[in-house]
Amino acid sequence: MAWRSQYPLMMPTLLLIIAAVALFYAVRLVAETYYDCRPAQVVRCPKTGKPVRVQLDATLAALTTLPGPPKLLVKECELWPEHQDCEQRCIRSAGKGDPR
C-alpha cells in the first residue's frame, strides 16, 4: 500500500475521469435521441392504412432514453383532430423506443 502514500490523488482523479466519460456518453445518447426524433416522420397509420406524417415528442424521448429505450409519443399527426384518440400504434414503425 505504499503507492497510496505516494499518489494520494490517484483514486479521486481516476474516479473523476470515469465519471466524466460516463457523463459524456450519457449526454451524447440523449442528444442523439433528441435529434433523431425531431424531424417529422412518415408512417403507415394502422387504423386507416394510409401513410401519414407524424411528429414525435423529442423532449420526452430524450429525457427517457437513459433508463432504457426511449418512450415515444406522437406530438402531432396529420389525421388529428379526427383521430386524436387513437392508440398511437404507428409509433412502432416510427422509432426504436417503447410506445407510451
Image (spheres, helix red, strand yellow):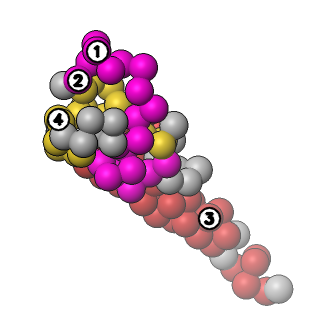
Classify 17 as above or below 41: below
Query: How would you rate the neighbour count of disc 2 (Cα within 10 Å): few for under 14, some for 14-19, many for 20 or more?
Result: some
* Nearest to the observer: residue 58 or residue 23: 58
Q: Main secondary structure of the magenta part?
A: loop
Q: Quadrant of residue 39?
A: top left
Please state the extent of the stretch shown in magenta in the rendering. 79-98
Give amino acid for label 4: Arg
Question: What residue is drawn where x is 82% and y is 86%?
Answer: 1
Q: Disc 4 vs disc 3: which is toward the camera?
A: 4
How far apart in space, not on screen, are marks 3 and 2 (Cα)? 51 Å
Q: Which numbered disc flags the more N-terminal residue, 3 or 2?
A: 3
Q: Which numbered disc flags the more N-terminal residue, 1 or 4?
A: 4
Determine the secondary structure under disc 4: strand
Q: Which numbered disc flags the more N-terminal residue, 4 or 2?
A: 4
Determine the secondary structure under disc 3: helix
How far apart in space, not on screen, are marks 1 and 4 (Cα)? 15 Å
- Circle number at residue 82: 1
How far apart in space, not on screen, are marks 4 and 3 (Cα)? 46 Å
Q: Which residue is mark 4?
A: 53
Q: Which residue is mark 2?
A: 79
